[in-house]
Image (cartoon, rainbow, N blue to C red):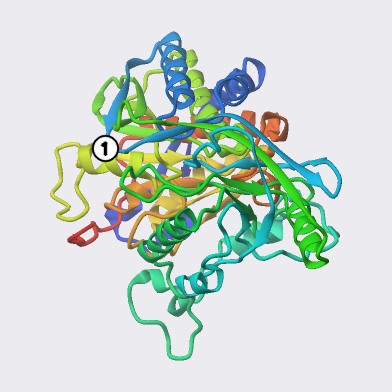
Amino acid sequence: MRKTILSLGLLAALPLVAQQSVHENIDLDVLNQIKAEAFQNSQASEDVFYLSDVYGPRLTNSPNHRAAAEWVVQRLKGYGLQNVHLEKWGPFGQSWKRNSFSASLLEPSYSPLIGFPLAWSPSTNGLVTGEPILAPIHSESDFEKYKGKLNGKIVLTSDPRTLELSAEPQSHRLTETELDARAITPDPSRLSSYGGPPRAGAPVAPPLDRAAALRLRNAIAKFLVEEGAVVVLQSGNIGDGGTVFGTSAGSQDVTAPLPPPTVALTPEHYNRIVRLLAHNVPVKLQFDIKTEFIKDDEYSFNVIGEIPGTTKKDEVVMLGGHLDSWVGGTGATDNATGASVAIEAVRILAALHKPLGRTVRIALWGGEEEGLLGSKAYVQQHFAPRDTLKQTPEYSKLDAYFNDDNGSGRFRGISAGGNLLTKEIFETWSQPLKDLEFTAVTGATTPVLKEPAGTDHTSFTWIGLPGYGFTQDPLEYSTRTHHSNMDVYDRVQPGGILQGAAIEAWFVYNTATRPDLLPRLPTPKPLPGK
């Protein structure tokens, strides 16, 4: 049954052209079919299993990342998608993999240590045993304190952290009050991303100077190697209870200084070592770390596949998420779930055999964890480079991109990206989804991003194209799984990915079949040097 929904509230305030754009015909029979396919024939959990248990972790350009991508290619071809391929971008640089790892406290009494080597950490070249020394380093000014003291030592470079009693549950689902609050625009004068000066006296967090942070990391790595540190230990600034958060010790840049072998430990074990040192108790630690740097192909790739459109096949609706991950766990909630939701959404649409006016294109990105590198490369190659914004013919043909990268929590809403007309359209599409708890359309007013941030749909909005991210129940994404050793299959909530795939398929279907492209905001000005 096709139902026409007209937003009367907006009509009185909008001119005729705008009024016409909020007439939406939605086909509830198609929604019934999407739900049936999503909930009765789902392959999403199987996708998560293969991407995490079989092929995880998936550091960009690692053998696991490539094997996962090749598996996805066969999966998409099996669903009947066309033009399925790995699309190269780059250069990215070197990749890395962990071959084996062991860590132990030997004295004053034996205990295994919970942790993992960070990405781009070198090997220990065999079993190493040594004494630890606490040497927190926050800036280059700290170097002088430790010169001549680190040779042959296992160096603890983080401050110990006082752990509080866990009085609240780690997992959280959004309440209706919290969803309503997300729809309220914050004080615009405090949104520095708009590009204008903040209101006088308004507190503004200093922007992160990524270049300065990279220079400091390289300087610390060089200092520790020159001083003869045999292993470096870090304690994350979040997490406890055996959950270890950590990402990288080095980088894909082959010219960057190589750090010593670097391990992130659970803070309880890290703190124990610090306390023993503070009491002058002799401590001996032992590590055996075997890693491998991979330099055979400096270019990375995105996974691309299409369901060809019919009447408007040159216009494209995109969906996706990133396929790469960090190395502590198996990359299950970040982002095997988002990749699997996208794979499942295109499977659903292909299984319905409903004509789609526009071409539907799935993209699973590489290099997201290193700075949205795959999606940034794609949008600048296909649509417009950010420094000139000289548009390709594809620019005007991209309808929208929908992204999933927030774990396995239920989809509870979607951001309209600062466009009131889009908000009205999305609210119409959301009305028959209330039984799935999808109710919120947020972001009626949002700042214009100066650069991509957070996740891959911002690579699209960065160049003026419609990119949308879904609001999800946070569950334990930030408290337990994101970039941690607990980012594993068992922390995935299957019901969330089934529901998410159904909703993403519904939004993509409506976008691909509506008469007009979704509304756009004005194209931003070029940013030379970006």
Please name the residue that numbered disc 1 is placed on.
91
Residue shown at the point (72%, 46%) measured from the top left: 285
Above/below status of 315 relative to 425: above
Residue 431 shown left or right of residue 384 in the figure: right
**Is residue 56 visible in this depiction of the protein?**
yes
- Along the horizontal axis of the image, is 24 left or right of 242? left
Between residue 530 and residue 288, name the one nearer to us: 288
Depth check: give the residue in front, 303 or 209.
209
Figure label count: 1
User: In the image, what residue occupies the spot 28% across and 20% down?
Assistant: 310
Query: Is residue 100 depicted above or below 522 in this figure?
Result: above
The residue lying at 49 percent from left, 57 percent from top is 224
Image side of residue 320 versus residue 283, left or right: left
Q: Amino acid at mark 1?
A: Pro
Whether residue 277 is situated above or below residue 119 in the rendered picture: below
* Residue 117, image x, y percentages: 59, 41
Extreme bottom residue here?
200
Crowding near the residue tagged with mark 1, few <14, some 14–19, many ≥20 C-alpha atoms within 10 Å: few
Whether residue 473 appears in this view of the structure is no
Badge 1 element: loop
In the rendered image, residue 32, in percent from the top left (x then y), is placed at 59, 24
Task: Quadrant for residue 37, please give it.
Answer: top right
Quarter assignment of residue 215: bottom left
Q: Identify the image quadrant of the C terminus.
A: bottom left
Please state the horizontal and vertical placement of residue 165, each as a whole percent of the image: 85, 61
Viewer-side residue, 126 vs 457: 126
